[in-house]
Image (cartoon, grey):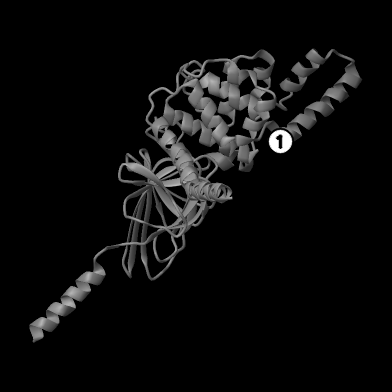
Amino acid sequence: MAKLAGGGMFKKIILAMFLLLMPAILFSQEINQIEWLSQLDSKAIATFGDGKKLFYMTFPEFSEKHKASPMDELNKYSDNSPLTRGMIAAIIARELNLKGSFLYILTGWERYACRACIAEGIMTSDSSENDPISGPELLDIMIQAKNAKGRN
Amino acid sequence: MKKAILLTIFFITFFYSSNSFADITVIKIQGTAAYRDGNKWSPLKEKMKLPEGVKVSTGANSYAVISLNSINHTVKVEPLTMIQIFSKETKSETDTHIGLKRGQITANVPRDEKVKTIFKVSTPVATSSVRGTEERITYGNRSGMTVEVLRGSIEATNRLGRGNLISGRQKFVQMSNSANSGNILSSVRSITIVSVNGYGLISEEAQMAIQEHFLIIFKETQQSPSTLHGQISWRGYV
């Protein structure tokens, strides 16, 4: 009987500790995101993994969608490969269904994905689809993509 | 005794005229927002008081609304943004300076005739001075600085000191890799200025005229379309 009572008390202690630690766990997850963004902001060359992660953070609705049907563009390169404008433009053009993305969908050439992003004001027109992009540039592109989605 | 009174008056006047730090208070938060506390980031909470020179950062799909002084100047820090806030306030003057490292903010600066207001937002490429207004400022490493006036008027100046006074939903755009700022009417030009073709026709009227002539000439002559197009152009409609 005493053993049973002790077990009940133990469960209550575990539950109380969990409730006490819950806000701390949630806050640390939030702070991790800010720390990661801060690190990304100082990266000279972003990786394909960074691009994917930031895209899912900015557009969480696509994260759920891709669990059911993975998109080709997201598995085309390894996460460690240096990110180019063409790679991130391809993801954005297909997912946000940009007006000028028809030629990209038809041919699969990243050059056309870049053009669609330039037409929507997401990217600037002063470099090619093969140029690597830095962390601050990736953040800039994602902010503009979010604004473009809001406009459409 | 007189000296003591004069000294007291001098110290009181000096105390009230000198700048004191304004109350920087968090009004509202959605999602993830943090401030730099020493060497680490700490989560922002509503009604939290922040120190002068504080750095604030927001995560994806998050925002924070921050009050900058007692006369209700506010800034909304939009997603993926990092700013630094300096705000000073006396009874007759407010002096607020925001450094925008990346992202987008919406500043709301209601005009108070009794208080001299200095409200500046700086990015690495340009500075905007608000004059009783609401404005949205975006800065990105590649896209440069864009100042959109939602209400009132502002003055935007680039690094070379070239300024533009902007009002009425106009935009100031300063690209990162350019010495000159963009035309402030570029965003509205396409919808306000109509291009005029030959005979004073706008493009839609010219198009209709071409179609009508195409049909008439086709009926009269029964010629091939390529020959007809040459004739219409020659007649001066396009």
Q: Residue at x 83, y 23 (%)?
A: B214
For the residue carrying disc 1, how many other residues have a C-alpha within 10 Å: few (<14), some (14-19), or many (20+)? some
Q: Give percent across and percent down for residue A35.
A: 41, 37
Q: Which residue is mark 1?
A: B201
Task: Name the image quarter holding residue B158.
Answer: top left
Q: Give percent across and percent down for residue A120.
A: 59, 31
Q: Residue at x 53, y 42 (%)?
A: B185
Q: Is A55 positioned to the left or the right of B229 in the image?
A: left
Chain letter for mark 1:
B
Q: Give percent across and percent down for residue A127.
A: 47, 20
The residue nearer to you, when weighing A125 against A114, is: A114
| Residue farthest to the bottom, as pictured | B1
Q: Is residue A55 above or below residue B66?
A: above
Looking at the image, how many numbered discs can be counted on the residues? 1
Give SS at disc 1. loop
Task: Name the image quarter holding residue B217.
Answer: top right
Q: Is residue B47 above or below residue A74?
A: below
Q: Amino acid at mark 1?
A: Leu
Quarter holding the C terminus of chain A is: top right
Q: Is B37 positioned to the left or the right of B147 in the image?
A: left
* Residue A74 appearing in the image: yes
The residue nearer to you, when weighing A93 against B153, is: A93
Q: Is A122 positioned to the left or the right of B201 in the image?
A: left
Q: Is B195 positioned to the left or the right of B205 in the image?
A: left
Q: Is residue B230 above or below residue B6?
A: above
